[in-house]
Structure formats: C-alpha cells, structure tokens
Image (cartoon, grey):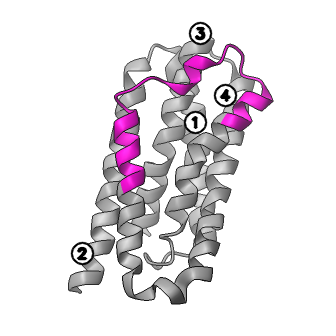
C-alpha cells in the first residue's frame, strides 16, 4: 500500500506544480477556480492509469520476460521528464484565462504521465482500482492546495514539487527493476 501512496504523491506533483502556477497567475484565491482545477486534475489523473493498466494486461503475455525493464524505462522516462521540466518554463504561463477548455488541456497534459505509470501497476501488484481512486484523491487535494499556495506567493515551490515527484518515480522504477532482477 505504501507504493501506491508514493506513486500517487509522485504523480500528483505535476498537477500540483501547474496548480501553483494557476494560483500565481490568478493572483487572489478563488475557491471556485481551485475546486474546478482540483476536479479536472483529480479526475484525469485518477482515470489515466486505468488506460495504462489495461494496455499492460493486453500486452502482458508478450512482454512478461522483460516487463520489469519496460516498467523501469517508463518510470525513469516520466521521472526524468518531470525533473527536466522542473528547470524550464511553466505551461500555465501561456494561458490568459482558465476556462474549462484550458483546464481540460492542462488536465490531459499533466495526466499523460499517469497513463504510462498505470502500465506498471500490475508489476507492483497493486489493485488498479484502489490505485486510481487514491491517485485521483491525492491529486485533487494537492491541486486545490496548490492553487491556494500559488496565490500566497508560493511560486518557488512549483519547480521543486515537479523535481521531487520525478525523483520519486525514478526510484520506484529502480525498485521494480531490482526486485525483479535480484529477488
């Protein structure tokens, strides 16, 4: 169960970072906007792992002998991408208003990583449905809090959250690889 909590926290960091940016850009705390951001990000972040998990089930017998390498590579790539992005420009800076369409685009963009991570749920022997709910709930909370923190001048946390989430995903990838190679 600890693995799904760590995975949930790591995956939610991307949404958390974007939510902070939305809060910074919005300027003052708006509960309605924070709730919309949390709902969009939480729902998409919670649903996307299901698609990745279903793909892994479909491909399971074909990649069974090297699935731990696939999981490691996916998590390392996702984590590496998050680490890299933590040093770059912020996506939400490109938007002037946070309409439902914009929030949908941001929710999809931040949850693509969760779809790839969903591919690894079977390897970690995690219940995919419990994982999806936990990922969605944690992302919901972090996104809501992220908007609040952003409005209070927390922009310095934006890149740090993404960096820490990336490190956690890479470490989970290494754990999967090591446990399948040596145990």
Mark-to-mark CA distance, 2 and 4: 40 Å
Residue labelled with disc 4: 34
For the residues marked 1 and 2, what is the alpha-carbon distance in whole angstroms?
A: 32 Å
Residue where numbered disc 2 is placed = 178
Q: Residue at x 23, y 86 (%)?
A: 183
| Marks 3, 2: nearer the viewer | 2
Identified at 41% across, 71% down, the residue is 70
Specify which label sits upstream in the sequence, 1 or 4: 4
Range of residues picked out in magenta: 77-105
Asked if the residues shown at circle 4 and circle 3 are in contact, with their CB atoms under 8 angstroms apart, the answer is no
Label 3 vs label 1: CA separation?
16 Å
Q: 10 Å neighbourhood of mark 4: few (<14), some, or many (≥20)?
A: many
- Give the residue pinned by disc 1: 143
The residue at the far top in this view is 27
Looking at the image, which residue is at 71% across and 22% down?
Answer: 98
Q: Are the residues flagged by discs 1 and 4 in contact, CB closer than 8 Å? A: yes
């Amino acid at each position: 169960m600890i693995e799904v909590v760590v995975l949930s926290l790591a995956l939610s960091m991307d949404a958390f970072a974007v939510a902070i940016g939305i809060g910074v850009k919005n300027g003052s705390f708006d509960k309605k906007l924070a709730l919309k951001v949390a709902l969009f990000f939480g729902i998409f972040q919670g649903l996307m792992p299901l698609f990745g998990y279903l793909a892994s089930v479909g491909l399971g017998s074909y990649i069974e002998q090297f699935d731990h390498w696939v999981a490691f590579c996916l998590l390392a790539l996702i984590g590496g991408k998050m680490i890299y992005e933590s040093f770059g420009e912020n996506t939400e800076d490109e938007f002037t208003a946070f309409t439902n369409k914009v929030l949908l685009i941001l929710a999809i963009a931040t949850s693509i990583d969760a779809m790839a991570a969903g591919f690894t749920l079977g390897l970690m022997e995690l219940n995919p449905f419990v994982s999806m709910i936990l990922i969605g709930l944690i992302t919901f909370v972090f996104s809501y809090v992220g908007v609040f923190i952003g409005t209070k001048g927390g922009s310095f946390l934006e890149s740090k959250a993404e960096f820490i989430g990336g490190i956690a995903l890479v470490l989970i990838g290494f754990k999967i690889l090591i446990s399948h190679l040596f145990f």
